Amino acid sequence: MYPLPSWVYDTVIYQIFPDRFHIGKGLKVENKRELYEQRGGQIESWEIPPKATEDNSHCKVFYGGDLWGIIEKLNYIKTLGVNCIYLTPIFLSPSNHKYDTVDHFKIDPQFGTKATFKKLLKECKRNKIRLILDGVFNHVSSQHPWFIDAINGKKEAISLFTFFKDGYVGWYASKSMPQINLENTFVRDYVLRVIEHYLTIGVDGWRLDCGHDLGPVNNSVITAKAKEVSSESYIVSEIWSYPAGWNMVDGIMNYHFANCIYAYLKGEMKNVGLALETTYLETENIYGCWNMLDSHDTERLATVIENKDLRKLAIVMQFTYPGVPVIYYGSEIGMKGGKDPECRAPMIWEEQKWDLDLLNFYRKLITIRRQEPALRFGSFKVLSEDPLVYFRRAPYPLHNMLIAINKDSIEKKITLSLTDSKLWGGHFVDLFTKEEFPLVSGTLRLKVKAKSFAILKMRNYTNQGYDQYRRIY
């Protein structure tokens, strides 16, 4: 396992689906009609929600979002408090999602040019925002030059894919996305050139699509190339399983975390504390894994958890569990959305339609997350299942934090034993409510209101110059 890039511990990520985020330069999608229709697409107005079609033609419906649009909204992203952007694919592709790549070395003109991308990269750096790209290396588009050559019978190209008597292997049997043969050295060298190229020009990391299909070996090879460019390169793989065992990358997209949280808040999982602690203990690269609650591939958080009080509990857990919090664009303002493509609706920019209470809640949590050492790199130990209480222990005892979650409709009271011999007096203070709970001989009496939470940090009190923690580290 390679060392985790130092900056990752301090990071909160914002995921953007470019076609649906913002159209730059004051344009509307109608002004860009030719960009889409000349390649077989159709345009749709920003306010019309996307809908699934049986023939998947919804993948050719475009709303006009582009890289300039992201550049123009960097101030919004910065004021939210996040310091890293993850973009779903931006390379040449016939679809709106761009997971069927035609050329990894060409920015899709629907999003902009290479100069536009470099401008985005420059502005991100100026605003101290890192940038992660999405690499699709398990399959390509059926319009990819390699595949066209293979269909036309060129032997060298045929070996880059897997053909059989009646067809070829495609991702999930999709004919538009033929799988490439990663055991072929030409293919693997190509993938590594792509990885190296964008890291060299200043990208901070890669998210690897279909990480399970790439397999452990290719995840390892890609990580090795990235670390060859810089030890600060960050590689995260799309793995939908239990996260332990994928330590050849810096982290995985931890959908297991999301499903545990959802099951817990819906009353379907009674021992979520055990599940979270076991995952923490067994996952070597847990601090590099993404704490996700929704994404472009899932229903939106506000659709899965409609009750906002319970939704806030999920978000608190997302920001206080070891790993990197990832916010899917629009979740911070309460956007809803069902399964793909409904979860990929255009971003709402009319502020009167925003849930401002939720937005401010996110901002406060992001600030706390980025300020507190215990939440960035502290250890994790569950102290109670009901209410759920866990301890984030930092190297310096006065940085220690407690998080309590009460999903039930009644207030919960509990007495906890804190297993830290360097803590013997003072108070734990709720960073949201400012309520104080005294620590007496390593025990803490705590109460948590119904459908609420407490994020508690140790506070030391001095008395006329006397400091009981003056020599404790």
Image (cartoon, grey):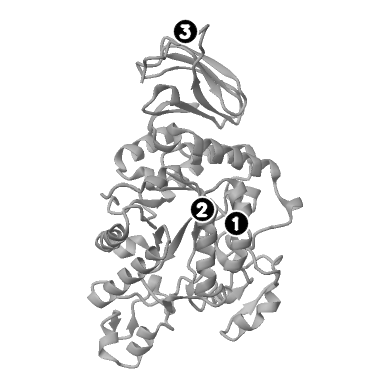
Q: Amino acid at mark 1?
A: Leu
- In primary-sequence order, the first of circles 2 and 1 is 1
Q: Is residue 267 visible?
A: no
Q: Position of residue 137 (x, y in %)?
A: 36, 69
Expressed as whole percent of the image width and height from the top left, the position of residue 236 reads: 38, 55
Does residue 42 appear left or right of residue 121 in this picture?
A: right
Which residue type does callout 2 highlight?
A: Ile
Q: Which residue is mark 1?
A: 74
Between 114 and 453, which is closer to the camera in this rendering? Answer: 114
C-beta proximity under 8 Å, tags 2 and 1: yes
Give x and y (percent) for residue 247: 28, 50
Mark whose residue sits in front, 1 or 3: 3
Q: Pick whichever, 280 or 232, lies toward us.
A: 232
Seen at 34% across and 51% down, the residue is: 250
Which quarter of the picture shows residue 163? bottom left
Kindly report the distance in space between the C-alpha atoms of the residues bearing marks 2 and 1. Answer: 9 Å
Q: Of helix, strand and loop, which one carries label 1?
A: helix
Left or right, 71 with reference to 179: right
Check disc 3 and report the residue beneath it. 466
User: Can residue 447 be seen from the camera position used here?
Assistant: yes
Name the residue carrying label 2: 129
**Dot 3: what SS?**
loop
Q: Is residue 429 above or below residue 20?
A: above
Q: Residues within 10 Å of mark 1 (few under 14, many from 20)?
A: some
The image's mark for residue 157 is none
| Residue 161 vertical position relative to residue 317 in the rendered view, above or below | below
Q: Quadrant of the C terminus?
A: top left
* Lower sequence index among marks 1 and 3: 1
Q: Residue at x 67, y 69 (%)?
A: 25
The amino acid type, in three-letter code, at marker 3 is: Tyr
Give neighbour class at mark 2: few <14, some 14-19, many 20+ (Cα, 10 Å).
many
